Amino acid sequence: MRLVTLDGGVLGGIIGDGVVALRPALAAAQRAAGEDPRDTIPDDMVALIGDEAAMVAAGRALAFAARAENGALRAPLSEARLLAPLKPGKILGVGRNYGDHAKEAGGPKLEMPKIFLKPTSSVVGPGAAVRIPPAVKKADWEVELGVVIGRPARNVSEGVALDYVAGYTVLDDISAREFQFDVPLAMTSFAKGMDGFCPIGPCIATADEVGEPWALDVRCWLNGEEVQHGNTRDLIFPVATLIAFLSRYMTLEPGDVIATGTPAGVGHFRDPPRYLTSGDRLRMEVERVGVLEHTIA
Ligand code: ZN
């Protein structure tokens, strides 16, 4: 499934070039089967992905809406206004997690993942016009695979870590580089935590839809020019390792998001450096997950 949050907080799913609201589709499926309508779709995405029975109901709703004769349940995706697919409880970022990006950034070889936090208040949805604070002169882009947790994870081993994943999304880990590199001590969470600095979306592609996340292409275009192109096979600490590591120290809850790091090609390490400015258009794609687009206001 490709789950989305529609305008007004309505939960939905993508089918081809159409979008389906889950509640009416489930009710229609139940009516068609002669069942009493029973609404088992929760009010928000975090509750949905954390509830196995609700996920089964969502799958049933989408399968019913996908049938040729049920076109009335589908609306054009191009006309839908999507919000961020979820409001994460916490967003855990991972620094320097691709070999080529670690090389462009320099510094020591990491023995364990470099973790920071992005606040939920930095989340915006697909199509957002992100306002960079006027005092920030070095805003930069980072396309990332986002891992969405589906079950509470505490002390899980690498071998079973992917069982705790609800799905995947695309995110832009926008970073004010002056607070990472131009201050005596890096202020990573602050640099990456400003309002709007975490565009997420367009959907949560469920784990069964994506398969194992070992070799997904990750790409970013700035104003139509490809500026990043990596692959998750080059992650220094892969998804399962990150979940196992983090869950030794903190409980990962349904709806938590891990921003797994960005490949080479960010603006700061270019010669000359390049930073985001008003009017910039970003297009970010993770293979089999989706395309996230947003602009800079
Ligand atoms: Zn990042």
Image (tube, helix red, strand yellow):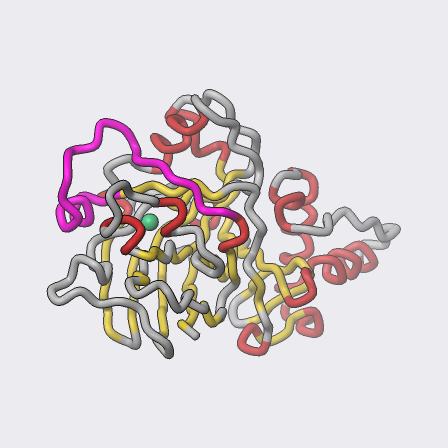
| Vertical order, 163 against 82 (above or below) | above
- Residue 215: x %, y % from top left: 29, 46
Is residue 55 visible to us here?
Answer: no
Q: Residue at x 52, y 61 (%)?
A: 124
Whether residue 280 is in magenta: the answer is: no
Q: Is residue 75 above or below residue 86?
A: below
Compared to residue 55, the image places residue 33 above or below, namely below
- Do we see residue 225 in this rendering? yes
- The image shows residue 34 at horizontal and vertical percentages of 85, 54
Camera-nearest residue between 201 and 76: 201
Looking at the rendering, which quadrant does residue 194 occupy?
Answer: bottom left
Residue shown at 21% from the left, 32% from the top: 110
Q: Where does residue 281 sit, x and y in percent of width and height?
A: 36, 74
What residue occupies the far right of the structure in this picture? 36
- 235 left or right, relative to 240: left
Q: Quadrant of residue 230?
A: bottom left
Number of dots carrying numbers = 0
47 vs 54, nearest the viewer? 47
Residue name at image x 28 percent, y 46 percent: 232
Percent x, y for residue 187? 34, 44
| Residue 115 sits inside the magenta stretch | yes
Q: 134 above or below 239?
A: below
Q: Left or right: where does residue 31 sit relative to residue 161? A: right
In this rendering, position of residue 98 left or right of residue 289: left
Q: Residue drawn 47% across and 61% down?
A: 196
Start-end of magenta stretch: 96-119
Q: Quadrant of the C terminus?
A: bottom left
Q: Find the residue positioned furthest to the left.
A: 271
